[in-house]
Image (cartoon, rainbow, N blue to C red):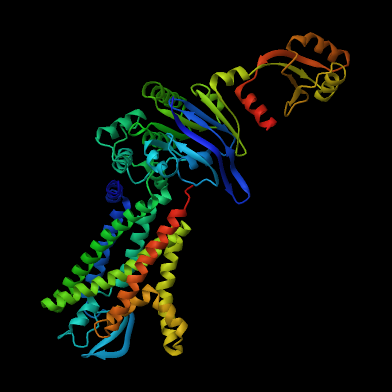
Amino acid sequence: MFANIIRCDWYRLVRSRFLQITVIVFAVVIGLFALFCTSGNSRFSFGGPTGNTKDGVPLIDGFVGFAYVDAAHPHFWEIMYSATCFTVITLFAISITGMIITSTDDLNGTTKLAVARGNSQTLMFVSKVILAVLVTGVLWVLHNLVTLLITLSQMDFSLTGEQWSAWVKFIGLSYLVQLVLMLLASWLVLLTRSRVVGFAVLVVLTFGTIIVTAVNRELDSQVINTLLAIDPVWHLYRIGRAWAETQITGQALLFCGVAIPVLMAASIIHLRSRELS
Amino acid sequence: MSTVVQTTGLTKRYGRTAALDEVDITVEAGQIYGLIGQNGAGKTTLIRLLTGLARPSGGSLSLFEDSGAGLNLQRRRIGALIESPALTLDLTAEQNIEAIRIQRGIAGRHRTREALEVVGLQDTGRKKVRQFSLGMRQRLGLGIALLGDPELLILDEPVNGLDPMWMATVRTELVRRARQDGTTVMISSHLLAELDLFATHYGFIHRGRLLAQMSAAELHSRCQHTLRIDVADPAAAATVLEEELDIRTFRIADDAGATGGQVILADHLDQASRINSALVGRGVEVRGIETRGASLEEFFADLVKGA
């Protein structure tokens, strides 16, 4: 029966207007990236250098692209920064996609039909999470592959096997953190039955984290540090430095390892007591 | 005959409010059970409890003589239309039904086509549901409920938005399924006259309580004949009936917007002449006097007033 639920959700998803829009937005984002990449003097910045360097490469907070110390001889991690600088856009795209996939049936009432036929709300939610991970995961990999190839082509750079491996780990870790954000947004929509709330929290988290991080550089408050440690956006901002500050990888993995099951459990607990109108 | 739906002391509270209060209903296989009540009486709450959309605060319910852990399994035998039809607006009618067919694991793509034909939506082609009228959406919701020939149909206001022709078609289809296939149908409605055309049994709900449960035959026999007297001054007429004729079992129906009203007696039908003389003798203007049966709406109104 679970297989039937997934098949049904997939059937609806591939025929939905939302997926068509997603494909168009994906193409537009890639197009924008290509424009940035090929425009010569453009620099993309949502964040900035921390002031530290490793091997001559500035370590960054956030997402900084097309800012090379020596453009004729770019460093591998400068290439990575550029190829992944649009993560600030994908963090919204992935979360919104997940939010919409997991909430559409609730909001249009089709969930009640399935429940009235004896289907478990939990299984139906898990089915949608699986689809959301599948769709966003594939788009995430495609996005990064295309932006990497564009960047490599623009900078006349090629990767070794080890560097490909580093790229895979880097985008994999970034995706896990964005998955936490997606589950958080989906959980909020479950609770409030409002996508506006889910989106608002995303916006507040994204911009609020920048402000709070900047303020806390001076304050160094332990309370703020603790709150930031459970903020997925904070972890995402730091991932660009993980190659140099390896403790960041461990912290992000630990964060995801705890946050993903906790958010899934919180969603399932809510669903088990939820009544449908 | 097996019991398809049984509730015992079924209760649903929201805070201090009892949306459903100690309701005992029994629906046997093959019945067309009409659940009657005003808006907010508790009909939809009962349906939500039967279909698992809400949990009871008290009492018990069983489906196909199975309760507790077996309920969800039995719900696979249900086709439901609950409040407004639940549809995916981006899809066509066929795609909406096909998605449900996949979800329910019903073999055979022809079943989708059959469901469309029953509700007359087989020619909608690539038109998306968001472009459908209210009536077309209602029909699609019905088509989804009927998909796979479920053994129990639970339909909440199924003819909302339908034109008279489609109301008749739906009625005919439900009666056919009940008689030929043994399908049990539970319909909630506030349109008693519409249900009267085909329901076999009734449950009357008011303010969360089940007032009465009866067969259609019993309902019709209880819509008894009454003596109705149109008078200019109902209060004066009431005084005459009580003081001069010692008749106390009557009710007054005011004629809203006009002077006068109607005195309605369930007894003393053979004393129309005597009552008329007494009223006229005491100066009460009698505009008309007749004996006729109560309408179903009047029966329900009396039932509610007595509750």
Q: In this view, does A76 lie to the left or right of B299?
A: left
Residue drawn at the location 62% of the way across and 21% of the way down: B295
**Number of disc labels:** 0
- Asked if residue B36 lies left or right of residue B165, the reply is right
Vertical arrangement, residue B248 with respect to residue B74, above or below: above
Q: Residue at x 55, y 18 (%)?
A: B217
Image quadrant containing the C terminus of chain B? top right
Please, is residue A127 above or below residue A47 in the view?
Answer: above
Q: Which quadrant: the N terminus of chain B?
A: top left
Give the quadrant of residue A81: bottom left
Q: Is residue B157 among what the camera can see?
A: no
In the image: residue B200, left or right of residue A29 = right
- Residue B283: tell me if it is visible: yes
On screen, residue A80 versus residue B41, left or right, reads left
Q: Where is residue B8 in the image (x, y as percent from the top left)?
A: 54, 37
Residue A217, position as x, y percentages in the image: 41, 88
Above or below, A246 relative to A261: below
Q: Foreground residue, B49 or B57? A: B57
Picture quarter containing residue B299?
Answer: top right
